[in-house]
Image (spheres, grey):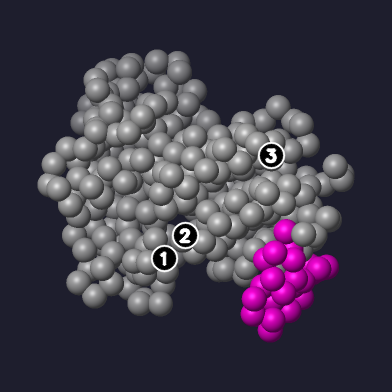
Amino acid sequence: MSATIRWGVLGAAAIATGRTMPAIIEAPSASLVALASRDAAKGRAVAEQFGIPRLHASYDALLADPEVDAVYIPLPNQLHFDWALRAMQAGKHVLCEKPLCTSAEQVAALIAERDRSGVHIEEGFAFRNHPQWAKLADILAAGTIGRVCAVHCTLAKQFLDPADVRNQLDAGGGALYDLGSYAISACNLIFQRPPARVVAAMDRDPAFGIDRLTSALLDYGDRHAVFTVGTQSGAYGWGTHQQLSVLGSQGWLRMNFGFAHARPTACQLEVGDGSHVGAFATATYTFEPANHYVLQIERFSQHLRGAAVAFWPIEDALHTLRTIEALFASARQDGWQTLAR
């Protein structure tokens, strides 16, 4: 393998040009060597902007490029599975934007291909690379707030443009796929297992057909999680409204910017131990702005180079998609749904 991991990107989506391509350039263990774009003019402009040496006119051409080690996939949700599978079959390691797929069956197929080919694949949840999440894990492991009893999450943003893929039902749009995947991933990360059963309430946009407001209760047996996600509520600005809190048997903790940082931003993790009163913290941990997209690319690249760094297997995505499917079924059938195992 080369001194740096050589990355190629499929398409010039906004998240790629605004966040991940700059991250690949900045990460010491990575280099951005190839771009594939079906729009020739846009591809040339982006390649020139980022100094990308090779521009391919098709995604298949990039996957056939022997000088590419890893592929980043920022395509619309409904295209994730096909191109992740093709990339793995071509021997490329894959970082694919969330949600990894639009069905649990598709994730299972990617797991099978990973096991067959031996390549590495991850779902692109950049938030997991932020140091505040390592601190959260340390606090929970130390028993500072006792046994975790419940998690509460809210994520919301005003996505009103009809052309936005989040508003396109056939493209895997809607609040649950886009924002709910964060909440489910975080809850499972904290509990270290998927829920046993779930129930949901949904409100759908009459024109777009997507779920624009979804609330869910996840039953982990002896502990619970609740989340609300919305695509027509909350913030108008550049950042999604985000809240996460964890209730323990002897205290609590909360994050004020726990998930996607569209711009690196200072944030806080507050802890209330058994002596707290109301919602006043007994300890506050402040984190300076950290680009978790750079941290994600660097960690992923270091893993490919054999370093002992964290990584998240896509079995996590299988649990997430099973939960999403069960929540959609719950809303249709108006009742609890037990998750498949």
Q: Residues within 10 Å of mark 1 (few under 14, many from 20)?
A: some
Query: In what element is the residue under mark 1?
Result: helix
Q: Is 42 one of the magenta-colored residues? A: yes
Q: Which residue is mark 2?
A: 77
Residue 238 x/y as whole percent: 44, 65
For marks 1 and 3, give the CA distance: 28 Å
Taking depth in this image into account, of 100 and 185 the one nearest to the observer is: 100
Query: Of discs 3 and 2, which sits in the foreground?
Result: 3
Give left or right: position of 267 versus 305. left
Query: In what element is the residue under mark 3?
Result: helix
Q: Is residue 96 above or below residue 152?
A: below
Residue 152 x/y as whole percent: 28, 38
Taking depth in this image into account, of 273 and 249 the one nearest to the observer is: 249
Q: Which residue is mark 1?
A: 171
Residue 28 x/y as whole percent: 78, 47
> In the rendered structure, are the residues bearing label 3 and label 2 in contact, judged by CB atoms less than 8 Å apart?
no
Query: Label 3 amino acid?
Result: Ser
Q: Which residue is mark 3?
A: 117
Residue depicted at 41% across the width and 65% down the height:
171
Q: Is 249 one of the magenta-colored residues? A: no
For marks 1 and 2, give the CA distance: 6 Å
Query: Label 1 amino acid?
Result: Ala
> In the rendered structure, are the residues bearing label 1 and label 2 in contact, judged by CB atoms less than 8 Å apart?
yes
Taking depth in this image into account, of 186 and 144 the one nearest to the observer is: 186
Query: Label 2 amino acid?
Result: Asn
Query: Of discs 1 and 3, which sits in the foreground?
Result: 3
